[in-house]
Amino acid sequence: MLKTLFTEDLMIGSLKANKKNKAIEEMVDQLDKQGKLLNKSAYLQAVLDREEEYSTGIGMGIAIPHGKSTGVKEPALVFARSEAGVDFDSMDGEPAHLIFMVAVPESANEDHLKILGLISRKLMHKDVRDQLMAAKSYDEVLKIIS
């Protein structure tokens, strides 16, 4: 499932942004460049609204910003890595270094939950997080999360 959602063009090996909203914008830009969005601003707003409700910084250096929106053409997953870390208001107060953005169309309720569950289960393991920080290529990242 992840291989169809996460393509090489949806990986940001070194995120430029160092603030949460800028990181989200950079990842949404990547989705838009790859033709995954019908309406970039609608999807961006859905993700920002979701962040207002409750931070997607889950701790352990991980954030999973996500949104369901009519602005999304097809389900997609962006992976970004930040050496410096981005403050996602995580419960443990630690910055996020591994950020996965999940984009799904408004109608895709189960896909959304399935993707979030798959990712969060994998990322609970420290060795997986360490491997993702060290991964040098898309193929390595895909192998680690698959």
Image: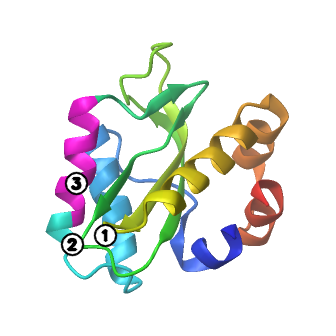
Q: Which mark is residue 89?
A: none
120 and 34: which is toward the camera: 120
Reading the image, the residue beneath label 2 is 40
Regarding residue 91, the answer to whether it shows in the image is yes
Q: Amino acid at mark 3?
A: Ala
Rendered residue at 38%/73% (across/down): 31
Q: Residues within 10 Å of mark 2 (few under 14, many from 20)?
A: many
Q: Which mark is residue 29?
A: 1
Q: Which mark is residue 46?
A: 3
64 and 13: which is toward the camera: 64
Q: Is residue 55 above or below residue 120?
A: above
Whether 129 is among the magenta residues is: no
Rendered residue at 64%/40% (across/down): 120
- Mark 3: which secondary structure? helix
Q: CA distance from mark 3 to mark 2?
A: 10 Å
Q: Which quadrant holds residue 138?
A: bottom right
Considering only order in the chain, which callout, 2 or 3, is on the residue closer to the N terminus?
2
Quarter of the image where the C terminus is located? bottom right
| Contact check, label 1 and label 2, Cβ < 8 Å | yes
Q: CA distance from mark 1 to mark 2?
A: 8 Å
Q: Amino acid at mark 1?
A: Asp
Q: CA distance from mark 3 to mark 1?
A: 14 Å
Judged by its main secondary structure, the magenta piece is helix
| Residue at the far top in the pictured view | 92
Q: Which quadrant holds residue 121?
A: top right
The boundaries of the magenta stretch are 43-53
Q: Is residue 48 left or right of residue 3?
A: left
Residue 3 point in image, percent of width and height? 70, 74
Q: Is residue 5 above or below residue 99?
A: below
What is the total number of numbered labels drawn onto the structure image?
3
